Image: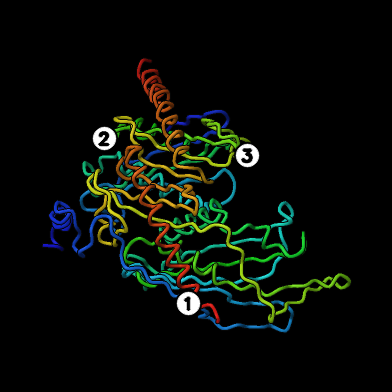
Amino acid sequence: FRTVEPLEYYRRFLKENCRPDGRELGEFRATTVNIGKFFEQHFLSSGSITTADGSALVKLGNTTVICGVKAELAAPSADAANKGYIVPNVELPSLCSTRFRSGPPGEEAQAASQFIADVIENSQIIAKEDLCIANGKLAWVLYCDIICLDYDGNILDASAFALLAALKNVQLPSVTINEETGLSKVNFKEENPLIIRKHPVATSFAIFDDTLLIVDPTAEEEDLATGTVTVVTDDEGKLCSLHKPGGSPLTGAKLQDCITRAITRHKEVKKLIDKVIESIRPK
Amino acid sequence: PRSSPSPGETSVLAGLYGPAEVKSSKELADRAVLEVLLRPKVGLPGVLERSREQLLRRTCETVLLGVLHPRSAITLVLQVLSDNGSLLSCCLNAASMALLDAGLPLSSLFCGVTCALDPQGAIVLDPTAPQEQEARAVLTFAIDSVERKVVTVTTRGGCSMEEMQQCLAAAQRAADTIFQFYRDSVRKKYSK
């Protein structure tokens, strides 16, 4: 019955206010996060450095997303001489789901990359000025690669979470510039964590039959849904981003409801991240 | 069929083709496939255009009665002619008018409205590019014509919940003017 008439199958569950995997409409899947150095360090003697400084693995139920942050040095652009760069990239490789083919990034991957770029921009998670080493000469570039290993819906939430966790884990070596020669010297022994100003958390909802709102949809639910809403909130209950690309029209009151639930979710996620960071801190 | 509304100096040309034949790899058995192509004024379409295309496509799919044209393709091409702020809502309006002009079966119309919150907290509707730059938040809504509900919303910059609701209310009021404009345009076209 589930394969032949998926929508009817779901409707039966929704009438009883629950979902096939046993969750309530407002319940999130079990979230686990793993932070740590997964990648090795490389050092090239020509003076340029490549370090994978922060990484995190997030699992929301079956959806598995890994984020690696690599820091490199570059010259800042002429019109933003005191700002560094953060370059996010979301990849949905064909191994994570049968719906994605190998080859250039599809529409969903590109839209997800744009979403993460917007989250970084809107929430000011890192002030780009903090990434500057020498005004006009040298700045950090953070390449954030977010790769999905298993796609079971709600990729936006998982990616945003993985990004936040990985950035909290990043340790940047200190860089000094020799005034006379203009050469930079990287000191690996002295590492500083990134200054994370805000902690944005994304919460996604799926809209069913124009009225019912479900939190944290799985891939099956996303296919059957008539729309999706993603709310990104930050620490003070401020709305960083509201992303509703089409789908069933919602009233202002329903949107308000989504935002309120997102704020509650934010507190849980923040607690989880803090707990994990605390547990890996070298004592 | 094409249409190009221009609030201020932002203008977008929309061309809609369909329902037409579709490649069998892309076809859907029970409904029409909608494809949106957004071409920027300069350069090649990038990640931002893809994300906007997805947004426009999902918005149009909400109103389009695709089930009346199974196994066919509807292509919407948007060319940005000039950009002086409020580009996304201009694209939304162009798309909606193109759908209307083509005579495709729709369950409702939608219109795009952009609200900017300037640093003092005042709401500016349909901001120009300099106003958008200075604003601390820019919200773009697609409002439907039946009950003024929100079909699409996307934001840039942060704001509080109350400010969002205020912008939404302002956008809903502005939607009335835009829908009147749609009516007048269609009337003008058919009264000749």
Please name the residue that numbered disc 2 is placed on.
B107
The first of marks 2 and 3 along the sequence is 2
Chain label for disc 2: B
Mark 2 or 3, closer to the camera: 3
Residue at coordinates 22% horizontally, 46% vertically from top-left? A209
- Judge whether B123 appears above or below A157 on screen: above
The residue tagged 3 is: B134
User: How far is mark 1 from mark 3, CA to CA?
Assistant: 42 Å
Viewer-nearest residue: B149 or B177: B149
- Secondary structure under the numbered disc 1 in the rendered image: helix
Name which residue type carries label 3: Glu
> What residue is at 38 percent from the left and 39 percent from the top?
B16
Observer-nearest residue: B164 or B79?
B164
Q: Is residue B49 left or right of residue A70?
A: left
Residue at (23, 58) in percent of width and height: A24
Marks 2/1 same chain: no
Which residue occupies the extreme left position in the image? A1
In the figure, A9 relative to B137: above or below? below
Q: Give the position of the C terminus of chain A as an image quadrant.
A: bottom right
User: Could you confirm whether marks 2 and 3 are on the same chain?
Assistant: yes
Q: Are marks 2 and 3 in contact (CB under 8 Å)?
A: no
The front one of B76 and A253 is A253
Q: Residues within 10 Å of mark 3 (few under 14, many from 20)?
A: few
Whether residue B82 is visible: no
Residue B180 sits in which quadrant?
Answer: top left
Q: Which residue is mark 1?
A: A279
Instruction: Give, as a three-letter code, the residue at label 2.
Output: Ser
For the residues labelled 2 and 3, the Cα–Cα distance comes to 37 Å
Seen as rendered, the residue at the extreme front is: A283
